[in-house]
Image: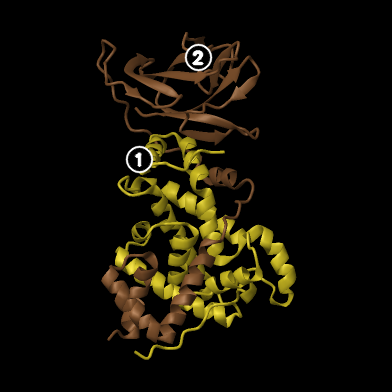
Chain colours: A brown, B yellow
Amino acid sequence: MLFCEDVELMLQDYLDGYLLPSQREVLEGHLRGCQNCGALLGGLTSLNGRLEGFGDVEVPTGLSQSILKSLPAQGYSPPPLRRWLVGGVVPVLAVVVIAAGFLFTGRFELHNQVASRVVDLFVSAPQAASVAVVGDFNGWDPQRTRMIRSNHEGRWTARLKLPPGVHQYSFVIDGSTWVPDPGAKSTLPDGFGGLNSVIIIDS
Amino acid sequence: MPLFEQKTPLEDAQVVRQVLRGRQEAFSLLVERYQKPIFNFIYRFYGNYELAQELTQETFLRCYQFLKSYDPERKFSTWLYTVAKNLCIDELKKQRAAREVPLEDVLPAIDARDVEGAVERNAQVQCIRREEDFKLLEALQELPPAARTVLLLHYFQGLSYQEIGETLGLPVSTVKIRIFRAKKILLEKWHELGGEGEIPMQGQG
């Protein structure tokens, strides 16, 4: 004989579908005979539906800017720089990123005493006459890093050397159309209503 | 639209590492990623838009200040929610202690004498489909803070029992019981305010 207090403890699991068939039988048996617990179950079921139906409200405009402005002016101080072996190139396992995006060749090179990482970017643009990479590493200048069209059906590539950090970039098609990298894992608003792609280089 | 849907906890930890190495601009990735869920959690907690804005800002600032104490083994999101929840509870205590705060600032921004107007004004902002839901939110915002928190985290923010446990430092079994009890209280409150919900009598075995 199941008391209502015991039933209550089972109801949550019942709603979540976690009860064993034998437990369900016992519970449903009680529910058939007990109006109170039946009413409770009905109330809880309709409540579930209501609670799950609420949508998200939009954040106030400018919230992220005001958050970033409130941060202390000085960032965290970086730990002391690690020096790589002199004599240059240390081969490391290459990491391949699936889907158009970028390819780490895994080579670390000394570049002004800061270990840079070699990154291959690629994008598919068969109709384009020219494609360039622009970003905070080349002053967003489409003249600086032109991509090379490979033979592989409109695939364009470029090789970059990037120091550790967070880098924003974009592609520029035919000198005028800015397009974020469809393979980029992260994006940030560009301040003009569009998006920049983001690469993070770990040291 | 930002592509943040299937991010693993490792990604957030990677960003945190960058910030701790001095690249403050990386923090903006975390803000962009989580400002909406955190804002929504706090907003639904009080029903007060301005307060939610203030506390969301405070949440991220605190996280930045205590970034070194973030344990990369746990989800960054649950850590954020923990900070947000603590801020909400602190704010409640503050408001209750300062008795000179007028009641209107503590209760949700609903003018009881002008429910229709309020419903219209708020419906857009709150994404409410009908008056029933309005009453439900009102009831929710009258619950004790612990009950409010678990319901918001589970049903509004979509956190699993596991994630809620991580946020509140509780085992999953306790989370389940809390949610169940919170729903019972909510049903009663909702009914009190004139909403739906059958009100079960006390059990008779």
In the picture provided, is B143 more to the left or to the right than A97? right
Count of marks overlaid on the render = 2
- Where residue B148 appears, as percent x and y from the top left, is 47, 69
**Foreground pick, B69 / B81:** B81
**Foreground pick, A170 / B5:** B5
Tell me what residue is drawn at x 64 percent, y 73 percent.
B104
The quadrant in which the C terminus of chain A is found is: top left
The quadrant in which the N terminus of chain A is found is: bottom left
**Foreground pick, A129 / B55:** A129
- Where residue A162 appears, as percent x and y from the top left, is 42, 20
The residue identified by callout 2 is A156
Tell me what residue is drawn at x 39 percent, y 46 percent.
B67
The residue identified by callout 1 is B10
Q: Mark 1 — on which chain does it sit?
A: B
Give the amino acid type for the residue marked by disc 2 in the picture: Trp
Badge 1, how many Cα within 10 Å: few under 14, some, many 20+? Answer: some
Distance, label 1 to label 2, CA atoms, is 30 Å
- The answer to whether residue B111 of the structure is visible from this angle is yes
Vertical arrangement, residue A103 with respect to residue A24, above or below? above
| Local secondary structure at mark 2 | strand
Q: Tell me the number on the disc at residue A142.
A: none
- Where residue A185 appears, as percent x and y from the top left, is 45, 33
Badge 2, how many Cα within 10 Å: few under 14, some, many 20+? Answer: many
Q: Mark 2 — on which chain does it sit?
A: A
| Local secondary structure at mark 1 | helix
- Assess whether mark 2 and mark 1 are in contact (beta carbons under 8 angstroms): no
Vertical arrangement, residue A174 with respect to residue A3, above or below? above
Examine the image and state in which quarter residue B52 appears: bottom right
Tell me what residue is drawn at x 64 percent, y 15 percent.
A175
Give the amino acid type for the residue marked by disc 1 in the picture: Leu
Do marks 1 and 2 share a chain? no
